[in-house]
Image (tube, rainbow, N blue to C red):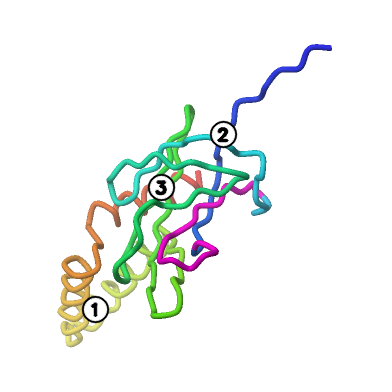
C-alpha cells in the first residue's frame, strides 16, 4: 500500500488572542464548519496590513511574532495556490486582554452607502457626512485603517459571495 502525503492548505482561519495573553495574536486554521484543523503544520505566508510574515503553524495554530501596542485595525491575508483569503479585524486592546472583532467587507459597503443615502434624502443632515469624514480621518491616522484596506476587504467579501 502506497500512501501519498496530501498538501497542506489553509482555506479559512480565525484570529484570537494568544493563550498566554502576552499581547500577541494567534491565527487558527479552521475548516468550513469552523472547527480547528490540527493537522496543519509548517510555515505559511500571511500579510498583515501589507507586511509579509512567515507564520509557523503547529497543530493548526500560529502566533504573530510582534505584540500589539494599541487598539488597531488589521487586515489579514493569505494566498493559496488557487485563491486568497482576506479578513479585516478590529483588535481592541485593554489592560487585561486583546479582543478581535471581525468586520465584514459588506458591512463596510452598506453602512456608508446607507448613511450617504440618508444624507442625500435629508439634505439638512449634511453634518452626518462631516461626522463620517471626521471619523474616517481619526481611524485613518490614529488606528491604522487605510482606504486601500477598506476597498480590499469589500472586494474580498463580494468575491466570497460569488
- Most extreme residue toward the bottom, as rendered? 124
Image marks 2 and 1: residues in contact by CB distance under 8 Å: no
Please provide percent x and percent y for residue 98: 44, 71
Q: CA distance from mark 2 to mark 3?
A: 19 Å
x 43%, y 53%: residue? 87
Please provide percent x and percent y for residue 5: 67, 22
Camera-near label (3 vs 1) is: 3
x 49%, y 56%: residue? 26
Judging by the rendered image, the residue that carries numbered circle 2 is 9
Task: Judge the density around disc 1: few (<14), some (14-19), many (≥20) Cα neighbours within 10 Å.
Answer: some
Badge 2 element: loop
The disc, 2 or 1, on the residue closer to the chain's N-terminal end is 2
Please provide percent x and percent y for residue 57: 53, 42
Number of the label disc, if any, that sits on residue 20:
none
Judging by the rendered image, the residue that carries numbered circle 3 is 156
Question: In front here: 106 or 98?
Answer: 98
Q: CA distance from mark 3 to mark 1?
A: 27 Å
Q: Locate residue 12 relative to residue 126 in the image: left or right.
A: right
Badge 1 element: helix
The disc, 2 or 3, on the residue closer to the chain's N-terminal end is 2
x 39%, y 80%: residue? 95
The disc, 3 or 1, on the residue closer to the chain's N-terminal end is 1
Judging by the rendered image, the residue that carries numbered circle 1 is 119
Camera-near label (2 vs 3) is: 2
Total numbered badges shown on the rendered structure: 3
The part of the chain drawn in magenta is 18-32
Camera-near label (2 vs 1) is: 2
Amino acid at each position: 500500500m502506497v500512501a501519498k502525503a496530501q498538501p497542506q492548505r489553509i482555506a479559512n482561519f480565525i484570529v484570537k488572542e494568544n493563550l498566554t495573553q502576552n499581547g500577541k495574536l494567534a491565527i487558527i486554521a479552521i475548516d468550513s464548519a469552523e472547527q480547528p484543523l490540527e493537522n496543519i503544520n509548517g510555515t505559511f505566508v500571511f500579510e498583515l496590513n501589507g507586511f509579509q510574515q512567515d507564520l509557523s503553524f503547529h497543530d493548526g495554530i500560529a502566533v504573530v511574532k510582534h505584540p500589539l501596542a494599541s487598539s488597531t485595525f488589521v487586515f489579514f491575508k493569505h494566498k493559496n495556490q488557487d485563491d486568497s483569503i482576506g479578513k479585516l479585524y478590529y483588535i481592541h486592546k485593554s489592560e487585561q486582554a486583546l479582543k478581535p472583532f471581525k468586520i465584514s467587507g459588506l458591512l463596510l459597503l452598506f453602512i456608508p452607502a446607507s448613511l450617504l443615502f440618508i444624507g442625500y434624502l435629508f439634505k439638512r443632515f449634511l453634518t452626518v457626512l462631516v461626522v463620517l469624514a471626521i471619523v474616517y480621518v481619526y481611524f485613518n491616522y490614529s488606528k491604522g485603517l487605510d482606504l486601500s484596506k477598506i476597498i480590499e476587504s469589500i472586494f474580498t467579501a463580494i468575491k466570497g459571495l460569488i
